[in-house]
Image (spheres, grey):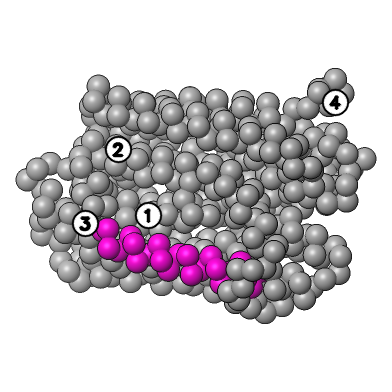
């Protein structure tokens, strides 16, 4: 009954995804460490880090990691029904319509770059604010188009996951990370580092923008090759009347609301981290990468490997109890290592901060910034990994259940989104107003952690049904 989800296949797939994700996360951490080492604890360094993650933030608002949860279950249904032609049509229409939406989003972001730049520089000293806004606006113009590439990457990853190809999608970001590291090497050799927004050469900004774009483009090509090998050449369509694509709208509202709330909160955190002083954004971004390690190496691998299995149980009309038992098995598999990783992040925050501070970013103040950020975020790192398992299970089960029952499951996600948004709305402004210096980063981390713990509790509660509670260990 539960062997579909708890067998060695799940553990094996999870381990392979985790190993590939470890490579991606390690190079991702190296990327931000190299950026900080070359550009230093400067406003320029903070702005480049903030703008460079903005396409991912916008992508998460519009689709993000929720995309795989939406595309994989219907793809699995088509593949199990030996309907490859319908699967290709579905993916093509999803790719075309999503890409078109992202093009519009890029145009809006470029038109609004003045406002976005003003938000990103809200915490910058007034003497530097004008130059900082100009630099941020130019970087946005160069980097915002990456949003379209991330949308394509999301679809290509979903194709591979539906066909049980897990390693390449998780490892491919290494290419992007290495590309940006190479860009920073070019910057260091050609221009040196330590520039501020008042004296930064135009050529240096162009190298940063173009190098970042080429890195993401290469990543997209690798994911395209992986999708092609898994299911044949992907096509692009724009048939909004496709009933299967339109059927995604209802479940998308809840799942995109979750990913969108995370992304909007991340943007707000970037803005707030600027109030900690020069280097604050870079320090918080490094700590955020550490915060997402349990999610990337534990929660997401287990959830991604379990999703097709849970979707098959739901699509075949298996009882709700079978799906929930499978979810609980996946959750138990994730809980111990996720909690251990979060605890290590808190207890070892000082040594970890000293370990990753290099070059022009290696000084007592930046180490203190890193320590405070790691300590605050570490409190909730495990809950984000466990929430991912609950979210994926909710999406898989909602597909095969009745309308009312599916909406009941999604109510847990809705409540989680509201709590997370409420904590950020109240907590982030309070931190900025009441604290200063490194304490700002500690406060931001605590606000994030409390919101994420509560979000997991609500999502998990939404998956508990009266028929299953008595049978769980």
The answer for how far apart the CA atoms under marks 3 and 2 are is 20 Å
> What residue did someone put label 4 on?
467
Question: Secondary structure under badge 2?
Answer: helix
Question: Secondary structure under badge 1?
Answer: helix
> What residue did someone put label 2 on?
273
Image spot of residue 285 (x, y percent): 38, 44
Of callouts 1 and 2, which one flags the residue occurring earlier in the amino acid sequence? 1
The answer for how far apart the CA atoms under marks 3 and 1 are is 14 Å
Instruction: Determine whether 180 is above or below 362 in the image.
Output: below
Count of all numbered marks drawn on residues in the image = 4
The answer for how far apart the CA atoms under marks 1 and 2 are is 15 Å
Residue toward you, 190 or 377: 377
Left or right of residue 398: residue 253: left
Q: Residue 198 occupies which quadrant of the picture?
A: bottom left
Q: Would you say the magenta stretch is mainly helix, strand or loop?
A: helix
> What residue did someone put label 3 on?
114
In the rendered image, the quadrant that contains the N terminus is top right
Of callouts 3 and 4, which one flags the residue occurring earlier in the amino acid sequence? 3
């Amino acid at each position: 009954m539960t062997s579909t989800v708890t067998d060695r296949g799940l553990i094996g797939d999870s381990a392979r995804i985790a190993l590939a994700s470890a490579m991606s996360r390690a190079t991702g951490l190296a990327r931000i460490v190299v950026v900080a080492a070359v550009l230093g604890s400067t406003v320029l360094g903070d702005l480049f880090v903030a703008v460079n993650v903005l396409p991912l933030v916008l992508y998460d608002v519009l689709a993000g990691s929720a995309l795989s949860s939406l595309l994989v279950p219907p793809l699995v249904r088509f593949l199990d029904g030996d309907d490859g032609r319908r699967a290709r049509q579905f993916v093509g229409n999803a790719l075309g319509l999503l890409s078109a939406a992202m093009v519009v989003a890029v145009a809006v972001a470029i038109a609004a770059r003045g406002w976005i730049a003003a938000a990103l520089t809200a915490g910058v000293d007034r003497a530097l604010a004008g130059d900082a806004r100009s630099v941020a606006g130019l970087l946005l113009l160069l980097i915002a188009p990456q949003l379209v590439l991330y949308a394509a990457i999301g679809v290509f990853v979903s194709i591979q996951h539906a066909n049980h190809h897990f390693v390449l999608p998780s490892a491919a970001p290494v290419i992007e990370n290495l590309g940006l590291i190479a860009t920073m090497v070019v910057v260091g050799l050609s221009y040196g580092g330590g520039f501020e927004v008042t004296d930064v050469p135009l050529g240096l900004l162009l190298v940063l923008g173009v190098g970042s774009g080429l890195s993401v483009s290469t990543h997209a090509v690798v994911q395209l090759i992986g999708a092609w090998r898994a299911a044949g050449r992907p096509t692009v369509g724009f048939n909004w009347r496709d009933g299967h694509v339109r059927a995604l709208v209802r479940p998308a509202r809840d799942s995109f609301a979750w990913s969108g709330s995370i992304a909007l909160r991340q943007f707000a955190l970037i803005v707030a981290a600027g109030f900690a002083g020069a280097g604050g954004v870079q320090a918080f971004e490094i700590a955020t990468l550490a915060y997402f390690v349990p999610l990337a190496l534990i929660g997401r691998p287990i959830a991604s490997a379990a999703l097709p299995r849970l979707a098959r149980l739901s699509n075949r009309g298996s009882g709700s109890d079978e799906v929930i038992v499978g979810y609980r098995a996946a959750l138990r598999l994730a809980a111990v290592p996720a909690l251990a990783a979060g605890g290590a992040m808190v207890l070892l925050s000082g040594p970890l901060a000293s370990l990753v501070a290099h070059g022009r970013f290696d000084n007592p103040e930046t180490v203190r910034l890193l320590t405070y950020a790691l300590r605050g975020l570490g409190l909730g790192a495990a809950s984000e990994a466990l929430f991912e398992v609950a979210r994926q299970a909710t999406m898989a089960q909602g597909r095969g259940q009745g309308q009312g029952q599916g909406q009941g499951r999604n109510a847990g996600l809705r409540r989680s989104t509201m709590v997370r948004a409420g904590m950020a709305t109240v907590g982030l402004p309070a931190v900025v107003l009441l604290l200063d210096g490194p304490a700002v980063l500690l406060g931001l981390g605590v606000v994030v952690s409390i919101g994420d713990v509560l979000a997991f509790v609500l999502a998990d509660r939404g998956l508990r049904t009266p028929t299953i509670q008595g049978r769980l260990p």
